[in-house]
Amino acid sequence: MPTYEYKCLACDNRFERFQGITAPAIEECPECNGKVKRLIGAGAGLIFKGSGFYITDYRSDGYKESAKKDNNKSSDKSTSSDKSEKKEKKSDTSSKSKRTSTD
């Protein structure tokens, strides 16, 4: 429920009321019973404090665990493929050196 700010037109009294959106506007000043006008408020500003806010900050533990498993699986695959590539490169260079020495 929002907080509305009012100003009395007769005595310049300013006051706030915590009202529902569908509630009727207040028409009388609580001080002098004069006519009041509802003011346009800036509202509460949204303030983010801290180093940063990311969607991953509030993930569940189950999600984090499955993400770790996925990362481990993909890193294992890349590690094994890196090893096989290194072996192929090594065998290519050794066969080239043999060819040059025999030629």
Image (cartoon, grey):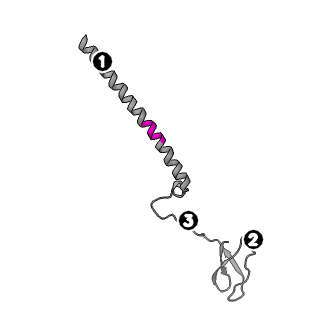
What residue would you read off at disc 2?
22
How would you classify the magenta stretch by its main secondary structure? helix
The quadrant holding residue 59 is bottom right
Is 94 in the magenta?
no
Dot 3 amino acid type: Leu
Q: Nearer the viewer, residue 39 or 17?
A: 17
What residue would you read off at disc 3?
46
Of the numbered discs 3 and 2, the one sitting upstream in the chain is 2
User: What residue is drawn where x is 25% and y is 12%?
Assistant: 102
Of the numbered discs 2 and 1, the one sitting upstream in the chain is 2
Dot 2 amino acid type: Thr
**Spot occupied by residue 89 in the image (x, y as percentages of width and height):** 35, 25
Q: Nearer the viewer, residue 84 or 100?
A: 84
Dot 1 amino acid type: Lys
**Spot occupied by residue 98 in the image (x, y as percentages of width and height):** 27, 16
Spatial CA distance of label 3 from label 2 is 24 Å
- Outermost bottom residue: 32
Of the numbered discs 1 and 3, the one sitting upstream in the chain is 3
What residue would you read off at disc 1?
96
Q: Is residue 52 above or below residue 11?
A: above
Q: Is residue 49 above or below residue 10?
A: above
Q: Residues within 10 Å of mark 3 (few under 14, many from 20)?
A: few
Q: Residues within 10 Å of mark 1 (few under 14, many from 20)?
A: few
Instruction: Specify whether 89 is left or right of 8.
Output: left
Q: Which residues are magenta?
A: 73-78
User: What residue is drawn where x is 55% and y is 65%?
Assistant: 46
